[in-house]
Amino acid sequence: MAETNTVRVVTEGPEGDDAKCSFHHRMFLEPQEKKRSMKALVVKQAQKTCSCTPAKVKDRVFGFFPILQWLPKYKLREYLLGDIMSGVIVGVLLVPQSIAYSLLAGLEPIYGLYTSFFACFIYCIFGTSRHISVGIFGVVCLMVGQVVDREVEKAGYDLEPAVLSSLPGTAAQVNTTLSPVNRTSQELLCDKSCHAIAVAATMTFIGGVYQVAMGFFQVGFVSVYLSDSLLSGFVTGASFTVLTSQVKYLLGLDIPRSGGIGSLIVTWINIFKNIHKTNFCDLITSFLCFLVLIPTKELNERFKSKLKAPIPVELVVVVAATLASHFGKLKETYGSSIAGHIPTGFLPPRPPDWTLIPNVALDAIPIAIIGFAITVSLSEMFAKKHGYTVKANQEMYAIGFCNIIPSFFHCFTTSAALAKTLVKESTGCRTQISGMVTSLVILLVLLVIAPLFYSLQKCVLAVITIVNLRGALRKFKDLPKMWHLSRVDTVIWGVTMAATALISTEIGLLVGVCFSMLCVIFRTQRPEAPLLGWVAESETYESLSAYKNLQTKPGIVVFRFEAPLYYINKECFKSTLYKQTGVNPVWVKAAKKKAEKRMLREKEVGSGDNQTSISMDFVPEPLGFHTIVIDCCAVQFLDTAGIRTLKEVCKDYKEIDVHVLLAQCNPSVRSSLIRGEFFKEGEDHLLFHSVHQAVDFALGTQGHSGTSASK
C-alpha cells in the first residue's frame, strides 16, 4: 500500500506588510509510492536468479573463476619478470615459516609445507586480489593448535609416546577416531601425529564450508563488526599467546602445552617451575639466531626502497642451523629437540574425519570469521592502493575453497598474511601468477629438499615464529597516537588485547566484539546535545558551547540532539532538554497546581480581602522563551519510544504555553512521525527544512500574536 499521508513543511513567504497576516506559506510533500508486495518481490527475485541465458552463464562462470578473466589478458613481457621474482622470494621466505608455524599448530613440519603449496595454488584460481599472499598465518595457527591439543588430549594420546611420529605417511592410512584404550595392533599405527592432523583437517573443512556459505548468502557484513582497532588488539593479544607457547622451545623445556582459559598464565607458571631444566645448547642457539634475525629484519625494513629484494635471512639461518646441528651432533650430545624426518612427495588424499565434526564445529566459527575478515580487508586495502577492484563475496569463496580442497590433502586452516603480502608487493608482483611461482618453489622443497631439514632444531623454528611477531607487538608504540585520535578505539584495542591474551583467543574475540558494540550503544545513550546560536549574516546555527560570538534570538531556544532517538536514550533526551532550557514543564505544572491548591484552601478559610491579596501574590515566573526549535539533522531514526517521547515533550511544553518546532528531519524520521500519528488535526505541529526557517516562523508568530493582543 502506498503512503497517502502528506507532510506539512513550512517555508518562508513574502516580506512586507501583508506578511504580518500570512508571514509563511505552506508546502506539502507527498511520499513516493512504495510497492511492498512481498509476493511480487519474491517472484521478481526468483525470475532474476533462475533465468538462464548464454551471457548470464558466461558471466557466472567467469565471476566464479576469475583466472579465466585475467589470464588471457596477461602481458607476458610486462608482468612475467616481476611475478617470477616476487613468487620466488615469497616462496623462499615461506619454506622456513611453514615448518615453524606447523610447530605452532601442534603438527608435523610436512603439513605446513602442504598447506602453503595448496593455498597459494588454489587462490590463484578463485581469488580476485593480485597482491595478497594466502598461506599460513600465525594467529590462525595458534587457534588451530589449541583445538588440536584439546582433542588429542581428549582422545588420550597424551598418555603415551607417539611411537610412529616419524611415519606420517603410514599413519595417515588408518582410522584415527577409535579410542586408544581398545585399539588393535593395526589401529596403533594411528598415533598422536595422525590424530592431530585429522582434527586440524576436519576443522579446516568446516571452516571453509562456513566461509563459502558466507559468500553464498552474502553475509560479508559480519566483518563490519570487526573494526580495525578490534582486529589489531586481537592480533596483538594472540601474539602474546604465540610468543608464550614458543618460549619452551627457546629454553629446550619439555612441558605440556596449556590450553583453555588462562593458558598464558599457566604456561608461564610451568616455565618458571621447570626453568632449572633449561637446555643450554638450545638457549645459546636461540640467542645466536635472535642476534642474526632481528638486525637483518630491521635492515630489510629500513632499506626496502633501495633493496631489489629483501635478504632471505630466515632461509640462511635455517640452512646454517641445520648444518651446525647435523655435523655438531647436537641431539646426540646435548639432547636438543629437532624437527625429525620430513618425508618427500605427497600423502594420498583422505577425507576429513566426519565423526570429529561435532567436536570442532563451534571452534571453526571464530577461525573462519578471522580468516575471511583479514583476507577481505587486506585484499581491499591493496586493491585500492593499486587502482583495481576486488569482490568481497568472491574473496570469501576463494579463502573458503583454500580451506575446503586442501583439507582432503592433510592441510590446516589458511588466510591472508600481511607480512608476506608486503614482501610480495614490494618485490614486483603484478598478478596472481606470483602465487603459482611460490607454489612451485614449495613443490621443489616437498619433492627434493624436505628431508635435509631432519637435524633442524625446534628452537630455531621458535625464533623464526617470534621474530615475525614484531609487527603486531609494535602496536604499543602507536598507542599515544591512537589515544590522541580516538580514545574509544584505544580502549577497544586494549580490552580486546587483554582478553585475548589473558583469557583465550576465542573469548577475547567475542569480548572485543561485544565491547565495541557496547561502546556504540553508550555513545548514542549519552550523546552531545548542545544549544545552538545564530551565525551573524547567515542562515547557519552552530553550538554555543563550541564557538564564540554566536547570537541567540529573543524568546527562542534552539536545541540539537546528536543521536538517533530510541528507547535507550529517550530519558537522556528529555533530561538534557530540560537541563539545557532550564525549564522542566512537569515541575512547572506541578508547582502551578500546588499553588492553585494552596490558594483554594486559603480561599475557603480566609476573608475576601485576603483572597484578593493571595490571588495577586501568585504570579507565574516568566520562562524566558516561548518556542523551542529541535534540530533533528543528527537524528537518523526514531522508534516507537522516541515518537512517544516527542509527543510527551510537545504536550508538556504546550501546557505551559511553549511551542515545540522540529527542523531538518530526514525522510525516515518524517515517515516515522506520520506512522506514529505525531501530526493530528487541529494541532499546530510543523516541520521545517532548516533551523533558520523555524526560528523566523517562531519570531513571526510571536510578533503577529503580540500585534493582535495590542489591538
Image (cartoon, rainbow, N blue to C red):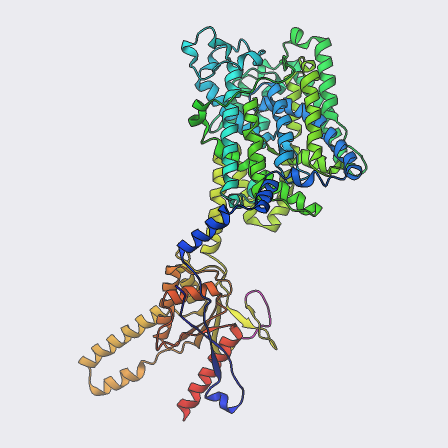
Q: Residue at x 40, y 54 (%)?
A: 39
Residue sitting at the far front? 54
- In the figure, residue 337 lies in which quadrant? top right
Q: Is residue 304 visible?
A: yes
Q: Residue at x 40, y 9 (%)?
A: 182
- In the figure, residue 331 lies in which quadrant? top right
Judge from the rendering whether residue 146 lies leftward or rightward of residue 478; answer left or right: left
Judge from the rendering whether residue 78 lies leftward or rightward of residue 386; answer left or right: right
Main SS, magenta residues: loop
Identify which residue, 81 or 100, lies in the foreground.
81
The quarter of the picture where the C terminus appears is: bottom left
Judge from the rendering whether residue 466 lies leftward or rightward of residue 195; answer left or right: right
Residue 646 lies in the magenta-colored region: no
The quarter of the picture where the N terminus appears is: bottom left
Q: Residue at x 45, y 88 (%)?
A: 21
Q: Give residue 515's position: percent from left, percent from top.
A: 48, 44
Q: Is residue 503 visible?
A: no
- In the figure, residue 98 lies in which quadrant? top right
Q: Give residue 20's position: percent from left, percent from top.
A: 48, 88
Q: Give residue 210's position: percent from left, percent from top.
A: 49, 35
Segment colored magenta: 545-552
Q: Give residue 474's position: percent from left, percent from top.
A: 65, 37
